[in-house]
Amino acid sequence: MRKYRPEGDRMKRKPVPKKLRNQILERDEHRCVLCWRKYQLDIHDFFDDPSNPFLPPSPPFKSQYPYANRRPFELITLCKSCHGKISTCDKHSPLYQLLVSIVKQNYEEEKRR
């Protein structure tokens, strides 16, 4: 099992557990948080992004259970189209900054609970 992944190497991830996926979809009203589409939805793991501007960096290895310690604010609903755009955009782009603000808002809401 490889512990490190070189830049650009996409590793097949295990799916988000059904209970957690349903919780995230429910919170995001079963819509993409960027374009509001209701179909072809993915759960995006914001912590998995090494250029994440406001969260601590991920460890240099992948857990066998990548979602075991995730909190709901760390995951968001994106359609496949927006997920692809986010995966390839620069962290200074307006689209990425919008995503950051949504994740921050989710974090603040979770803190209040």
Image (cartoon, rainbow, N blue to C red):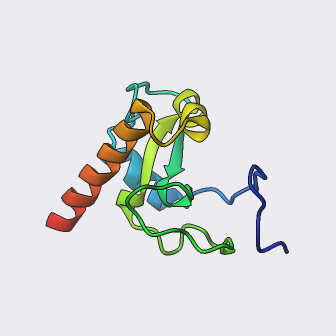
Question: In the figure, 36 relative to 8: above or below?
Answer: above
In the rendered image, residue 77, in percent from the top left (x then y), is placed at 44, 42
How many numbered callouts? 0
Q: In this view, does 58 lie to the left or right of 14?
A: left
Q: State the residue in front, 89 or 22.
A: 89
Q: State the residue in front, 42 or 10.
A: 10
In the picture, which quadrant includes the N terminus? bottom right
Is any atom of residue 113 visible in this view?
Answer: no
Q: State the residue in front, 28 or 33.
A: 33
Residue for point 57% across, 58% down: 50
Is any atom of residue 71 visible in this view?
Answer: yes
Residue farthest toward the front in the current orientation of the protein: 92
In the rendered image, residue 86, in percent from the top left (x then y), is placed at 53, 37
Residue farthest toward the right in the current orientation of the protein: 1
In the rendered image, residue 21, in percent from the top left (x then y), is placed at 48, 53
Residue for point 24% across, 62% down: 110
When asked about the image quadrant of residue 14, the answer is bottom right
